[in-house]
Image: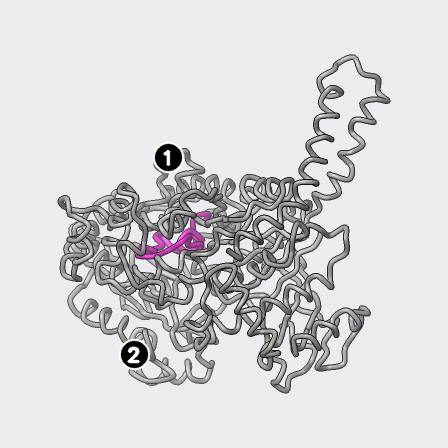
C-alpha cells in the first residue's frame, strides 16, 4: 500500500509541468505551420528553444566502483564517453560517484588516483572550492567522510581527452539509525529485504553509499543543473538510484546501465551447460511467457539479482547488447513491458598501416621463434581475464582442429594467451623465471608464477602442447607487454599495441560476454576477430554491417543444438554433452577460419582496409549520437517514467 501512496503523490508535481509543456507546444504549433510569418515572429517562436537548448547541456552522475581506477568494462565505458567530443558537446557536468576508504594513511593528493586532483577532503582539511558548509551537513548527518575533485582521461596515441568530477564517500562508520530507516524504506517501497543480503559487503557497501551520495550530489548541484540524470552502473548503483527515486522527485532521472545481467551471468557460469543450455532455455521460456524464477527457482538468494530485478523502476534501462536486453526481459514481467534501449560499447580507434602491422608482426614472430623454435605462419592471440565466462577451454578445442588443418597445408601457428590471476609480476621475478626455466614457455606452480585460475589454464595447455606440433599455445600470465614485464627475449621496443597489431586472429569465444571490447580491439589492425554468438559485440557488428558478412569477424555458435531438446533436458545438460556440441562447432569454425587466414601481405593489407572501414562505424561518437543521447533527451523531456 505504501508503494501506491508514493506513486499517487509523485505525479502531482510532474502533471503540472507536463501540462505546462503541453500548452507551450500547443501555442507554438501555429507559428511552425504558418509559412508566411515575419522574421520577428519566427525569432519569437524560436525563443523558447534557447532555454531548452541550454537544458540540453545535461548533468550526468555515474555511480560506479570505477570512479577513480579503471578496473574493467565499466571503466572503459566511462573513459570512452568522457573522451567523446559528441558526449562533451551535450553534457555540461559529469560526476562520478563511488565508495572509498579514507582510513589508510596516504598522501592526500593521491586519493583520486594518478589522474585526479583533490579539491575537497574533510579528512585532510582540504577545501579549495568552498564546499565545506554544504558537505559538512551531509557528513554530520550520515557520519561519513567526503572526498571531491576532478580527474582527467587520456589514452596514449589519441588526440582526444576528457574530464569528470569525482565524488567519493567513506561509508565504513555509518549512522546506523539513518541506515536502518533507509533499509526499512527499501523494504516498504520496493520489497527489498536488506536483512537477507547485508552480511555481504558487496551489498552493504552500496546501500550505505546510497543516501549520503544522493545528498552530497544534491549539495553540488545548482538549479540550472537539474534535472540530473543518475546512472546506476550495474547492481552497485541501484541503491543510489532507489534513493533518488524515493527523494529526488522530478529533479532527478534515473538510468540503469546494464553492462551485464548479473542473474544470467550467475546461471551461465555455475551450470555445466553454460551458454549452450541457458540461451536455449531462455528462448523456450519466453515463448511460453515464463521468467527466470520459473525456470531457475532460488535465484532470489543472489544479492545482485535482488538489486538488478528492481531496475525497471528507473526512468530508463539501457543494455550494452541485444542478449543483455533479452536477459533483462527474462527477469520478470515488469521488464518485459519496459522499454530497454540498446547502447553498444564503442571501440577505440586504432589507426594502422600495412607497414606498421608488418613491423609489429615481425617483432611477435621473432619472439615466437625464440620461445618455440619455429617461425609460425599464423599468429593468434587472446587477451582476457582468467574467469569461467571467457571459456578458455574453447581455445584448446579450436587449436586442436587448426593443428590438423595446418599440418595438411604445411603451415604452423602460435597462440598467445595473455591473462593474469596473480596481478603484475615484478621485473626481477620475471627475469628470474625467464633465466631459470624459460618462462613463459614453461611454468612452475606457485607465486610469482602459476596461481589461482592460472593453474587450471596451464593444466589444459601443457598436455595440448605435448600432443600437437603445428600449433603451440603460450600462456603469458602477466599484465602488460614490454621487456620489464615479459622478459629479455621480447624485442626491446615492443609494447601491447604491437601485440594487438601483430595478431592475425584474436580469439574471444566466451560463454557469457555482455559486450566484449577486447575481442574486437585488433579489428582495425586487420585481425580476424573470432567471437561467440552470445557476445554483445557480435550484435554491434551485425548492426553496423546491416547483417552482411564481413571478412574480419567470424562467429562461433555454441548454442546450436544437434537435435531438438526440451527445457527440462536442457537444464539437465552435463559437461560431456556440451563438450560434444563445442567440438562440432570448433571443427566448423576451423574450416571457415582456414579459408579466411591471410598467408601473405596482400591479404593482410586487404583485411586492414576492411577492418578500418568497420571500426569507423563503431566508435564512441556514434554510440553517443545514435543511442545514448536520444535516450537522455527522451527521459529529460518527459515527467519521470518509473516502474
Residue 621, percent across and down? 58, 44
Return the disc, 1 or 2, that comes first in the chain's sequence: 2
Q: In the displayed structure, does residue 27 sit left or right of residue 549?
A: right
Task: State the residue position of label 2.
Answer: 443
Residue 315 position (above or below residue 141): above
Kindly report the distance in space between the C-alpha atoms of the residues bearing marks 1 and 2. Answer: 43 Å
Q: In the displayed structure, does residue 538 sit left or right of residue 275?
A: right
**Can residue 351 be seen here?**
no
Nearest to the observer: residue 192 or residue 633: 192
Task: State the residue position of label 1.
Answer: 547
Which residue is depicted at the point 43% across and 60% down?
499
Q: Residues within 10 Å of mark 1 (few under 14, many from 20)?
A: few
Element on which disc 1 rests: loop
Residue 461, percent across and down? 24, 69
Q: What's the colour scheme?
A: one colour
Q: In the displayed structure, does residue 261 sit left or right of residue 70?
A: left
Element on which disc 2 rests: loop
Q: Which residues are magenta?
A: 501-524
Amino acid at each position: 500500500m505504501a508503494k501506491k501512496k508514493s506513486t499517487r503523490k509523485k505525479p502531482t508535481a510532474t502533471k503540472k509541468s507536463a501540462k505546462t509543456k503541453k500548452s507551450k507546444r500547443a501555442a507554438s504549433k501555429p507559428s511552425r505551420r504558418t509559412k508566411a510569418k515575419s522574421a520577428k515572429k519566427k525569432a519569437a517562436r524560436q525563443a523558447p528553444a534557447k532555454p531548452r537548448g541550454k537544458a540540453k547541456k545535461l548533468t550526468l552522475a555515474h555511480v560506479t566502483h570505477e570512479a577513480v581506477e579503471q578496473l574493467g568494462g565499466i571503466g572503459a565505458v566511462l573513459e570512452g564517453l568522457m573522451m567523446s567530443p559528441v558526449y562533451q558537446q551535450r553534457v555540461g557536468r559529469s560526476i562520478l560517484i563511488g565508495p572509498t576508504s579514507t582510513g589508510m594513511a596516504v598522501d592526500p593528493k593521491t586519493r583520486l588516483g594518478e589522474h585526479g586532483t583533490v579539491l575537497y577532503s574533510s579528512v585532510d582539511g582540504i577545501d579549495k572550492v568552498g564546499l565545506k558548509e554544504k558537505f559538512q551537513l551531509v557528513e554530520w548527518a550520515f557520519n561519513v567522510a567526503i572526498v571531491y575533485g576532478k580527474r582527467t582521461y587520456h589514452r596514449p596515441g589519441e588526440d582526444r581527452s576528457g574530464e569528470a568530477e569525482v565524488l567519493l564517500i567513506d561509508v565504513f562508520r555509518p549512522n546506523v539509525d539513518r541506515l536502518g530507516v533507509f533499509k526499512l524504506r527499501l523494504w516498504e517501497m520496493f520489497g527489498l529485504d536488506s536483512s537477507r543480503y547485508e552480511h555481504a559487503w558487496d551489498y552493504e557497501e552500496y546501500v550505505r553509499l546510497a543516501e549520503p551520495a544522493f545528498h552530497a550530489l544534491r549539495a553540488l548541484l545548482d538549479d540550472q543543473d537539474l534535472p540530473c540524470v543518475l546512472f546506476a552502473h550495474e547492481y552497485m548503483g541501484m541503491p543510489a538510484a532507489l534513493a533518488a527515486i524515493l527523494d529526488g522527485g522530478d529533479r532527478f532521472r534515473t538510468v540503469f546501465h546494464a553492462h551485464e545481467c548479473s542473474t544470467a551471468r550467475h546461471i551461465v557460469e555455475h551450470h555445466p551447460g553454460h551458454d549452450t543450455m541457458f540461451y536455449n532455455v531462455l528462448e523456450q521460456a519466453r515463448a511460453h511467457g515464463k521468467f527466470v524464477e520459473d525456470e531457475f527457482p532460488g535465484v532470489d538468494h543472489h544479492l545482485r539479482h535482488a538489486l538488478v530485478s528492481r531496475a525497471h523502476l528507473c526512468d530508463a534501462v539501457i543494455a550494452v547488447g541485444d542478449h543483455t536486453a533479452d536477459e533483462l526481459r527474462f527477469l520478470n514481467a515488469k521488464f518485459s513491458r519496459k522499454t530497454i534501449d540498446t547502447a553498444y560499447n564503442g571501440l577505440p580507434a586504432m589507426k594502422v598501416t600495412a607497414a606498421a602491422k608488418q613491423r609489429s608482426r615481425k617483432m611477435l614472430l621473432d619472439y615466437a621463434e625464440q620461445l618455440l623454435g619455429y617461425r609460425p605462419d599464423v599468429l593468434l592471440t587472446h587477451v582476457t581475464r582468467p574467469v569461467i565466462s571467457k571459456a578458455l577451454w574453447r581455445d584448446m578445442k579450436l587449436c586442436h582442429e587448426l593443428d590438423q588443418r595446418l599440418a595438411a597445408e604445411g603451415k604452423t601457428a602460435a597462440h598467445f594467451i595473455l591473462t593474469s590471476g596473480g596481478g603484475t609480476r615484478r621485473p626481477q621475478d620475471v627475469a628470474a623465471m625467464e633465466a631459470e626455466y624459460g618462462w613463459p614457455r614453461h611454468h612452475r606452480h606457485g607465486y610469482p608464477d602459476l596461481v589461482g585460475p592460472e593453474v587450471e589454464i596451464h593444466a589444459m595447455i601443457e598436455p595440448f602442447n605435448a600432443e600437437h606440433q603445428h600449433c603451440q599455445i603460450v600462456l603469458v600470465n602477466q599484465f602488460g607487454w614490454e621487456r620489464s614485464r615479459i622478459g629479455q627475449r621480447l624485442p626491446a621496443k615492443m609494447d601491447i599495441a604491437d601485440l594487438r597489431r601483430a595478431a592475425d586472429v584474436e580469439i574471444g569465444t566466451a560463454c557469457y560476454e555482455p559486450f566484449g571490447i577486447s575481442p574486437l580491439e585488433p579489428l582495425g589492425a586487420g585481425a580476424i576477430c573470432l567471437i561467440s554468438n552470445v557476445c554483445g559485440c557480435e550484435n554491434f557488428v551485425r548492426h553496423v554491417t546491416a547483417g552482411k558478412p564481413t571478412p574480419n569477424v567470424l562467429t562461433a555458435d555454441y548454442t546450436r543444438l544437434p537435435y531438438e531438446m526440451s527445457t527440462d533436458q536442457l537444464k539437465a545438460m552435463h559437461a560431456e554433452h556440451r563438450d560434444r556440441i563445442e567440438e562440432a562447432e570448433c571443427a566448423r569454425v576451423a574450416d571457415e577460419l582456414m579459408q579466411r587466414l591471410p598467408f601473405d601481405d596482400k591479404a593482410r593489407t586487404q583485411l586492414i582496409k576492411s577492418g578500418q572501414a568497420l571500426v569507423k562505424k563503431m566508435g564512441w561518437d556514434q554510440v553517443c549520437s545514435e543511442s545514448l543521447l536520444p535516450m537522455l533527451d527522451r527521459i529529460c523531456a518527459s515527467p519521470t517514467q518509473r516502474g
